[in-house]
Image: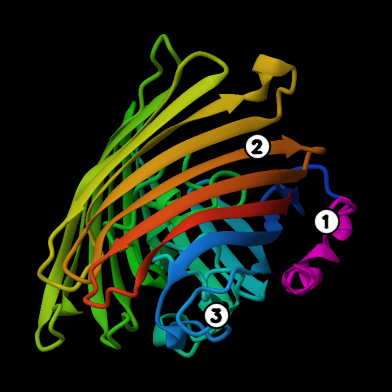
Amino acid sequence: MMKQLSDLSPVLRVLPVLALIPVSAKAYDITDRFSLSGVVAAAGQCTDVSARLPAEDFSDAIPGAFDNTCRGAMPIQIAASLLASERDEFFLRLGYAVDNGLNPVSPFRLAPWAADLEDDLEDINGRGRDYLLAAWYRHTFALGEEASLGASLGILDTTDYLDGNAYANDEYTQFMNEVFVNSGSYGLPSYDAGVALEATLGDVSLTGVGMNVGENDDGNNYNFWGVQAGWHPELALGPGNYRVIAAGASADFLDPEGFETQARLGYGLSFDQALGDTVGVFLRLAWRNDDAAVDYEALYSGGVSLIGAAWGRETDNIGVGYAYLEGGNTDVRRSNVFEAYYRTQVNDFFALTADLQYMSDALIDADPAQEDPEGWIFGLRATAEF
């Protein structure tokens, strides 16, 4: 256990520093047109997992078994926004991270923490670019009192435009597991050249995104497109968001046999609804075709967020979520993910989150000695936002 905890020491040393960052808001306005914002998160996660997998898949595994361990990571993101006019904005985001946490050594197909970690920020999409996450220009056309059209061009993140959710979309302040950040069924790419259009008319929105991505896991350059229609009503129960999403990619993904390339297509729903002042619920349903190799062809997830006002802690909240994923055409039959967290807001910018995940993967394998991975992941995350 002492060896496992030693893997967390670089992260544990920065926790007191995060609590002393002298910032009192979620953005710092340098002028009335120029602002800076950012997030610094340090997290440690430990496994209590039963699995017997090929040792070559894990560099520090006991031969034929998974070695339970503790790992930490610390991502940092800084963003700058310049409003050249009331309708024109220039935006820049940079990212840096220390270590990779459990993600590269976990026996599960889904990442225990969906943050952009050290390996994610080097040679992004095979472009030879490090640390630059987003750089775009947006112009907004006013089409009436309640209508507008925004057009963005540059290095984009498609998750900023598609598959959003009020209660399950932020790996730094909400759930940590990737299944509750975005569905995964759309293959949403990040940090590459693209264009986005965002139209609003009252409580209805229409969004379209196109992107050229340097390379996928097969080493192929590909084109991505995604569209979303949203309804954002203010109901008697509270505000809600109801989205329908479709997304696809060009025929540059290998099929399960690895001989031909195929296109990808996914579609689904993302709903969130406040139920009064202290309860919110969310639901995601998503499906994708299986012409190309995919681990999962369907996802069903949902959960609840409880606001701390119910127990006298207005800035705290509890999140509970469950996801079931049907296997695709690789070696995964199905996966289950349960996650619960308690987030306490220490002050205006600093929060601590205790996180618990249960995960299980049912795999297809001819080796009777293989044991499907299942078990618990315990996490602690400290986040400072400015």
Residue 91 appears left or right of 262? right
Q: Which of marks 3 and 2 is in front?
A: 2
The image quadrant that residue 13 belongs to is bottom right
Where 21 falls versus 206 (above or below)?
below
Residue type at mark 2 is Tyr
Q: Do the residues labelled 3 and 1 touch (CB within 8 Å)?
A: no
The disc placed on residue 342 is 2
| Earlier residue among tags 3 and 1 | 1
The disc placed on residue 119 is 3
**SS of the residue under disc 1:** helix
**Residue at the (61%, 57%) spot, across then down:** 81
Q: Distance between the residues labelled 3 and 2?
A: 28 Å
Q: How crowded is mark 2: few (under 14 residues within 10 Å), some or many (20 or more)?
A: many
Residue type at mark 3 is Asp
- So how many labels did they put on this image? 3
**SS of the residue under disc 3:** helix
Residue type at mark 1 is Leu
Q: Can residue 166 be seen in this view?
A: no
**Residue at the (57%, 25%) spot, across then down:** 306
Q: Label 1: which residue?
A: 18
Colouring scheme, one of rainbow, by chain, secondary structure, one colour: rainbow
11 inside magenta stretch:
yes
Q: Which of 371 and 121 is in front in this view?
A: 371
**Residue at the (69%, 53%) spot, across then down:** 381
| Earlier residue among tags 3 and 2 | 3
The image quadrant that residue 15 belongs to is bottom right
Q: Give the range drawn in magenta.
A: 1-22
Q: Do the residues labelled 3 and 2 touch (CB within 8 Å)?
A: no
301 inside magenta stretch:
no
The image quadrant that residue 39 belongs to is bottom right
**SS of the residue under disc 2:** strand
